[in-house]
Amino acid sequence: MTAKDPNRLPHEKGFHISWDQMHRDSRALAWRLDGRGPDDGAWRAIVAITRGGMAPAMIIARELDVRTVDTISVKSYHSGGGKADQRSEAKVLKSPDKELMGDGTGILIIDDLVDSGKTLELVRELYPNAHFATVYAKPKGEPMVDTFITGVSQDTWIFFPWDMALQYVEPYRGTD
């Protein structure tokens, strides 16, 4: 199979992220965001995009000493077979506190990954002055994010630690 083979399964070009790597990359994102807030470098609040943004948001809130943390829940609906390139619309299921958010000034919006950019596009419409940061970014979504740590190709499937389970694997050679 080649890299452009449409029959390639997602795990065949996979990028596996461990909890340790997520922690290191989230801290690196915090360092990159440190001092860049509009209030003498500080941020008023962090909003995590559920569910993937919750772990990095917690780490970043700790590193930057931001005590106000909220969430926004966005559901992406799929048409057809549910492939990512067939996403048709996204809907906000839960919004953060309106008084806190305003137009987004001083707010860090955090997600684990920007892929197509559809989720961030919707959230950016709601909070145009917020700062959008992700740990990982794919090329189609990069225009929607202000700060990220690691870029990956569009056809790479990222395996996050919360999606994985440890299990026994047979050795490559031998069984005794």
Image (spheres, helix red, strand yellow):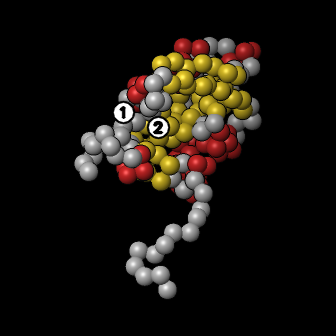
Tell whether label 2 touches label 1 (CB within 8 Å).
Answer: no
Q: Which mark is residue 54?
A: none
Residue 81 in sight in this render = yes
Tell me the CA gap for discs 1 and 2.
12 Å
Q: Mark 1 sits on what residue?
A: 139
Image coordinates for residue 38, horizontal then vertical, percent:
59, 24
To which quarter of the image does residue 64 belong? Answer: top right
Q: Secondary structure at mark 1?
A: loop
What's the residue at 46%, 29% (across, down)?
A: 81
Residue type at tag 1: Pro
| Residue 145 in sight in this render | no
Q: Residue at x 54, y 23 (%)?
A: 77
Task: Tell me what residue is drawn at x 53 percent, y 28 percent.
Answer: 132
Q: Residue furthest bottom?
A: 176
Residue at 32% x, 43% y is 7
Foreground pick, 114 / 127: 114
Tell me the amino acid under the disc marked 2: Phe
Looking at the image, is 12 positioned above or below residue 155?
A: below
**Residue at the far front in the pictured view:** 81
Q: Is 99 left, or right, of 73 in this rendering?
A: right
Residue denoted by label 2: 148
Q: Where is residue 160 shown, x and y percent of the image? A: 54, 48
Return the residue nearer the eye: 106 or 38.
106
- Tell me the SS state at disc 2: strand
Residue 29 as seen in the image, left or right of residue 50:
left
Residue 158: give x, y in percent of width and height.
46, 46
Left or right, residue 10 beside residue 112: left
In front of the other: 129 or 42: 129
* Label 2 Cα crowd, 10 Å radius (few <14 / some 14-19 / many 20+): many
For label 1, the crowd category at 10 Å Cα-Cα, with few meaning under 14, some 14 to 19 and many 20 or more, is some
- Disc nearest the viewer among 1 and 2: 1
